[in-house]
Image (cartoon, rainbow, N blue to C red):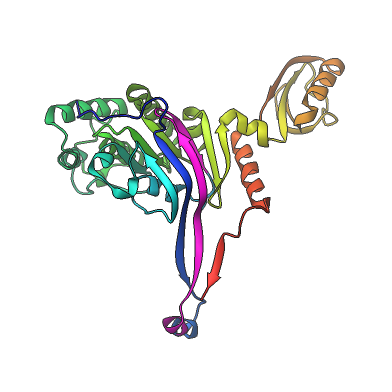
Amino acid sequence: MPEDHPVPGPADPAIRVVELRKTFVVPEREAGLKHAIRSLVRRRTRQVNAVDGISFDIAPGEVVGFLGPNGAGKTTTLKMLAGLLYPTGGGLTVLGATPSRREKDFLSRITLVMGNRNQLEWDIPAADSFELNRAIYRIPPQAFAETRDELVELLEVGDLVRKPVRNLSLGERMKVEIVGSLLHRPQVLFLDEPTIGLDVTMQKRIRAFVAEYNRRYGATVLLTSHYMADVVALCKRVIVIHHGRILFDGGLSGLSSRFAAYKTIGVTLDDPTIDLGAYGEVIHRDDQKITLRVPKLETSRITARLLSEQAVADLTIEDPPIEDVIETVFASGEDDERLPEREKVSE
């Protein structure tokens, strides 16, 4: 087994972020030769607040979804947590360490997996890259073999690790990348779109693996994904970020309660030809079942009307799809006038 490291106590967060900020200075110019020459003597820049004063704690063993549209600041935050970027302001600790110091003990207890980046050597079998990782992390040979074989079995990649990485499909490559990233049994996993571009079956296998790794080792997981199925399957808590600011931090069920303006009512009638348009917006018909969208505050009243006025064989009330709720959250961020101006142009 790999060397044990002290872990945070029950009262200590595995990840603590306090007023974290990251500002990039980005050069800009208009198209054309004239502006290209002008920029040589008078450069025009703008400040982009990629992360704008966010704060949160994540407990040991917690799996948290980190959601937001492209450019919201998710990957920038993960890179600061992993020690790849130095914050502009604020503070953060991971397992009690300051990530930007990149201390050896800290790096041996975390991992960052990015779905659109490769860490394994392209032209050699993944098994050979695993040996390289063993040397980098100084994992004892017996502990390395046990961990490697366990991860290979969990992800069912026994036949793949002997092939050159370039010969693997995207899904196969992602699975062996994950094995390579977890050989040192990290206590904190930063997963940035780990299922991006994969088919539904492969996404499901990756999700099942992450859940099992969390269960076996009590690992803390911070997950970004545009696939809501990943979030629903793995995360009880979500943090929603937009324009570098946190819009929501709480339970996944609470997200629907707070932001969903409507619910859906599924009604099965003895006579499916009856028009239910007077009760709400009909959004779907499937044989005898009709799905209505109704205002959340009117749900009880409309349900009572349906049961008293129609021959209802079955009725269900559900929250809207989580994708729709997330879209509503993003829209609320766009409309929030309290958000500061994100970019400032200077010369």
**Camera-nearest residue between 136 and 104:** 104
Majority secondary structure of the magenta segment?
strand
Note whether residue 254 is visible: yes
Location of the N terminus (image quadrant): top left
Q: Give yes or no for residue 62 being in the magenta stretch.
A: yes
Rendered position, 33 above or below 99? below
Note whether residue 226 is visible: no
What is the x, y in percent for residue 213?
34, 27
At x 61%, y 57%, the residue is 340
What is the x, y in percent for residue 287?
70, 23
Q: Give yes or no for residue 262 being in the magenta stretch.
A: no
**The residue positioned farthest toward the left in the image shown:** 141
Q: Which residues are magenta?
A: 38-67
**Camera-nearest residue between 270 and 150:** 150
What is the x, y in percent for residue 13?
42, 32
**Camera-nearest residue between 273 and 174:** 174
At x 57%, y 31%, the residue is 252
Rendered position, 292 above or below 52? above
Rendered position, 34 above or below 182? below
What is the x, y in percent for residue 260?
68, 35
- Quadrant of residue 280 in the image? top right
Q: Is residue 152 left or right of residue 46?
A: left
